[in-house]
Amino acid sequence: MPHINVDKDLPGIRSLMAFSPQTAAPMGELANLLLRTSDTLSMADRELIATHVSYLNDCFYCQHSHGAIAVCYLDGDTSLVDQVRTGDPNAPVSDKLKALLAIAASVQKGGKFVTTQQVETAKQLGATDNDIHDTVLIAAAFCMFNKYVDGLASNTPTDMSSYPLRAKQIADNGYGNHIFKNKQPVAETAQ
Amino acid sequence: MPYIPLESHLPGITGLLEYRKDTGQPIRELTEILLRGESTLTRAERELVATVVSNGNKCQFCSAAHAATVDMLLGESETANMVKADIATAPVSDKMKALLTIADKVRENGKLVTPVHIEAAKSAGATDREIHDTVLIAALFCLYNRYVDGMATAMPADSSYFTMLADRLVNHGYYRLPQGYDHLKKD
């Protein structure tokens, strides 16, 4: 049960954002800027970083929500997403992304755990300064989102079939207040 | 040495918020709403949450900056110092002790906040909004602390920098200065 009185029909961060729409607005904007940008890091790469950090923070709602969004960008490749989510070193992703995931994992432990060596390795594998910056900020931002979601014990859907439906909303329309203002998606068979 | 090129006259968080101004803007706005917006918690109380979390995360820059801000708001440095040392015996209300304890749990992991912590805060008079804001401030400073230390940003050469920074945060707030930060260059 959530620690505060939030809308019981909304899951996870959506219920918290509905409780506090004023703070939801900049949080949604930050998520769009960090996760819906595609340059030398793709949107899939960015969601994979978010997914792995959320897994390390043991935030069930966030790791499965962002994992499902990554699946949308990766043509349904759930096995790759599961491998990256859980930190499998054999995940079929580029060495550059592996180096960035290692930096993200250090950020999750604490900023001081990031080493010069990790950053040098990432740069040698082609990571730009912006890639390093965005990786650290995505990892730091997901520590915020994960702690917000779990610190208030928000509702965590256990029906795994609901995650791809919410993920599609975000893959189609991005982050923003529509995720709690619009009707929550339901499976066609349940309608 | 920071891991990416940052303006050398902008230590700590400021250089990062200037490096990518577009992401800096919503981070600044969220902070302004939480720490200086309308609230039944005082500005000093909210800055104490930021201080406790930054201190617990051993983020030297954020801890010094927000402790200096508390000191300026309260006109004394005893409260921030004592809160950093031990929440239970610090000279703050029972409600604040309960909220600061929640913030410290959030810092470790959100799941460590239990119904017992929430009950303690509520029976000391904390509202749902105050609990929400405390958790979100604590979570936001976990972002800040990791951003500042994860990029290996510099500490200011002189601790008087924090007095200047606290003055800016108290009197101007968290939005970007309209004129930017070139006036801080030494040469």
Image: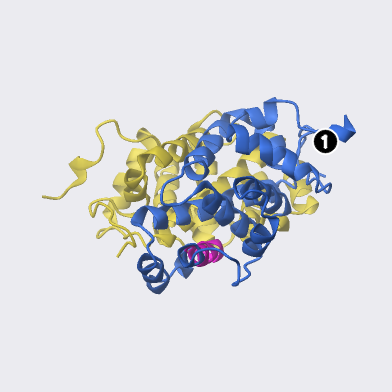
Chain colours: A blue, B yellow
Whether A35 is drawn above or below B32: the answer is below
The answer to whether residue A98 is left or right of residue B106 is left
- For image coordinates 43% across by 61% down, the residue present is B150
Whether A106 is drawn above or below A77: the answer is below
Q: Residues within 10 Å of mark 1 (few under 14, many from 20)?
A: few
- For image coordinates 76% across by 31% down, the residue present is A184
Q: Nearer the viewer, residue A126 or B177?
A: A126
Amino acid type at image mark 1: Ala
Residue lying farthest right?
A190
Element carrying mark 1: loop
- For image coordinates 47% across by 40% down, the residue present is A33
The chain identifier of the residue carrying mark 1 reads: A
Q: Is residue A102 magenta?
A: yes
Residue lying farthest top?
A182
Q: Main secondary structure of the magenta part?
A: helix
- Residue that mark 1 sits on: A187
x%, y% of residue B141? 51, 50
Whether B149 is drawn above or below B18: the answer is below
Give the quarter of the figure containing the C terminus of chain A.
Answer: top right
Residue lying farthest left?
B187
x%, y% of residue B11? 30, 54
Q: What is the magenta range?
A: A100-110
x%, y% of residue B80? 48, 53
Question: From where the camera sits, is residue B159 visible?
Answer: yes
Q: Nearer the viewer, residue A149 or B55?
A: A149
The answer to whether residue B144 is left or right of residue B49 is left
Whether A136 is drawn above or below A155: the answer is below
Q: Is residue A165 magenta?
A: no
Residue lying farthest front?
A75
Question: From where the camera sits, is residue B124 visible?
Answer: no
Give the quarter of the figure containing the N terminus of chain A.
Answer: top right
x%, y% of residue A178? 64, 28
